[in-house]
Every structure is written in C-alpha cells, then in structure tokens.
Amino acid sequence: AAGGDGDGGDGDGTLVSVTAAAAEAASTPVLRIGDINAMLAEQRRALEAKWATLADACPPADDGSLLSPVELKLSIAVKHLDDCCSQLSQGVDYIEAMLKKQLLDAVGRLVTPADFQRYMDFHGQRLFKPEYAPKPFCFAVRRPDHYPEGTLTIE
C-alpha cells in the first residue's frame, strides 16, 4: 500500500511497506481482513504521528492565538479525508474506464440506448407469436378545450 500525502503515510512521500510474504500469501485479489486492519492501523498511526509532530510546533491553546492544536488537528483530519475521497473517486473512475474498455473490446463499438432497444426488440419478437406480442401504448393527455399537456406511455 502506498503512503504519502493523505493516504496513510506521514506526508513526506514515504511508502507504507507490505511484507513480501503477505503479498505472496494472497491467492485472490481480495485483501484479507487482517491485511485491511493492518493498513488501517498504520494509517491511524501515521496520522497521529503527524498530529503530534505539528502540535509541538503550534502555540498552546491558551495563548489567544488564532491557530491552536485543536484547529490544527481538525485541518489535518479534513485534508486527510479529502485525500481519501479523491483516491476513492480515482479508484472508481479507473474501474469504470476498465469496464468500458472491456465492453468496447468485446462488442467492438460503443453501445447506445438505441442499440440496446433494437436488441431487446429483436429478442422480444422471438419470445412471442405475432398475435400475442405486446403492442406499444401511447396516448395524449388532454383536457377539454386545452392543448395536449403531456403523454402517457407504457412500454
């Protein structure tokens, strides 16, 4: 697991190491609960170490200054949370791009809603005999002496 700004490291670009034995022991791409707990414990340790280091440089809370250790701790926690959210977003974007690429490679082109509708219509025709096939239903919704105000569709 990588460290660095906001991702479990202490902000100086160092990496949080994962032992080679733990990496080799994993037979599935899913992390074991023990590994997850170890990473979370290291993240917490690094965050608390950063708080302690910066709290020593901050003036005490009772001297009337604008920045006290409490505000400093809160700002570091919020920055860390922002970094975690950014990494989550990047991870989801990566997975989405990977799935889109796999779909494009499998199908050969981008599938649009119209393509999917044609696919469903084709297979729907195979399910029903022509006399039992569902018919589209669409009516204009009107009030007397008024222009149509909408449509009602059941597809």
Image (spheres, rainbow, N blue to C red):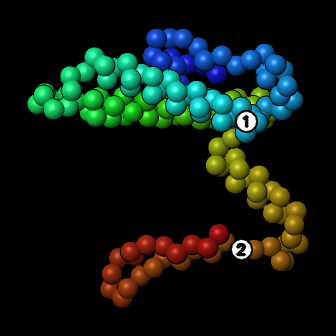
Q: Earlier in the sequence, mark 1 or mark 2?
A: 1
> To which quarter of the image does residue 54 belong?
top left
- Which residue: 78% across, 15% down? 20
Q: Which residue bears the numbered disc 2?
A: 135
For residue 27, side relative to residue 68 (left or right): right
Q: Position of residue 102 (x, y in %)?
A: 75, 31
Query: Disc 1 marks which residue?
Result: 34
Q: Secondary structure at mark 1?
A: helix
Residue farthest left in this picture: 64
Dot 2 crowding, Cα within 10 Å, few <14, some 14–19, many 20+: few
Badge 1, how many Cα within 10 Å: few under 14, some, many 20+? few
**Kind of residue at disc 1:** Gly
* Residue plotted at (38% across, 85% down): 143
Label 1 close to label 2 by CB (< 8 Å): no
Q: How far is the residue under mark 1 from the one under mark 2? A: 57 Å
Residue 33: name its quadrant.
Answer: top right
Residue reaching furthest top?
13
Taking depth in this image into account, of 138 and 46 the one nearest to the observer is 46
Which corner quadrant holds the N terminus?
top right
Q: Using the rendered image of the protein, determine whether residue 7 is visible from the camera's viewpoint.
A: no
Does residue 147 lie above or below 29 as drawn?
Answer: below
Q: Amino acid at mark 2?
A: Lys
Q: Residue 114, percent across and down? A: 65, 49
Q: Does 116 appear above or below 38?
A: below
Q: Residue furthest bottom?
A: 144
